[in-house]
Image (spheres, rainbow, N blue to C red):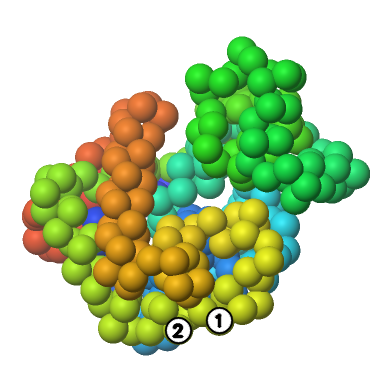
Amino acid sequence: MKDNLVIFGPTASGKSSLAIELAKKHRGEIINMDSMQIYRGMDVATAKPSENEREMVPHHLFDLVEADEDFTVFDYKILALKTIDEIKRRGNCAILVGGTGLYLSSLYYDFDFRKRDDKKRQAIERLYKEGGTESLQQKVKENYPQLLEQIDFENPHRLMRLLESGSVENQKKRSMLPLTLIILESDRDLLNEKIRLRIERMLQNGLTEEVEQVYSRYGQREYLPALRGIGYKEYFPYLRGEVSLEEAKERHHIATRQYAKRQRTWGRNQYENPIFIQTNLSTEEKIKKIEEQWR
């Protein structure tokens, strides 16, 4: 039986459509590896597979929790491993698809996850509510000055996780899970154009209406990881009348380009001997290259 297949790469690089074609050809079942697609009611901005696409082949680990429910990388790892086992028992191929590096690393490496301390977590959330990001930054400076260069200092969610766990990253040790890792690579200008077109399609498909629904329900808790997702936080100022739609759209475009750059860097630096495939190839050519190296 073949290894579990991973298709990783920057946003808008065509991961999902490629995975569906591979799944149809190889009795595959798709497992979500995107940290935003776990949330219910957050579909347009996350580019979640459509109902039609989900009917083509089985899809797993989508729409797991509400935006205000806690869901950790450890939770993901447990569910992903369970799902992989169930797919294998059916005699099918597990195809993991997405661009969340921490989700991939949780399976690729044998991280030693620590038990969550709910009281500590609540105290950190209270600190943020009372003092905002600056209060978290000050706490990190006091407690973990040696880690300042290793963390996104403007991201309150990352600061909260550091204060909770006491570390930026667990020690890496390759897991026993058999994985064939495919990383899609795209010309930067071509990818930027795809990102621009994707955002236009999102707006045509009701992005602002979806953002408004999310904001009306959770807007008082903008610290939630779900509400800090790209495609949501850029439009909240627009809903409040602080910026124009064009400015919000431009912020969305910039944030997505920056995220795609981080994903490319992550894919190149975090894993041993991944298989890189260029996105300018035809679907048939990409599938052939994957089949040649899929163990």
Q: Is residue 287 left or right of residue 2?
A: left
Residue drawn 46% across the image and 49% down it:
100
Disc marking residue 176: none
**Element type at marker 1?**
helix
Residue 104 screen position, x and y as percent: 49, 44
Query: Above or below — where is 174 with respect to 95?
Result: above
The answer to which of 176 and 46 lies nearer the viewer is: 46
**Element type at marker 2?**
helix
Please say whether residue 30 is visible from this viewpoint.
no
Residue drawn 58% across the image and 73% down it:
215
Report which quarter residue 241 is drawn in: bottom left
Report which quarter residue 270 is drawn in: top left
Q: Amino acid at mark 2?
A: Glu
Q: Is there a contact, CB below 8 Å, between mark 1 and mark 2?
A: yes
Could you tell me how far apart the alpha carbons at marks 1 and 2 are, in whole angstroms? 6 Å
Residue 154 screen position, x and y as percent: 52, 37
The answer to which of 228 and 239 lies nearer the viewer is: 239
Q: How many marks?
A: 2
The answer to which of 5 and 47 lies nearer the viewer is: 47
Q: Is residue 105 left or right of residue 72?
A: left
Q: Is residue 6 left or right of residue 131?
A: left
Q: Which residue is mark 2?
A: 209
Few, some or many residues within 10 Å of mark 1 (<14, 14–19, 20+): some
Q: Amino acid at mark 1?
A: Gln
Residue 231 screen position, x and y as percent: 41, 64
Residue 264 screen position, x and y as percent: 30, 39
Query: Above or below — where is 207 with respect to 243?
Result: below
Q: Which residue is mark 1?
A: 213
Report which quarter residue 139 is drawn in: top right
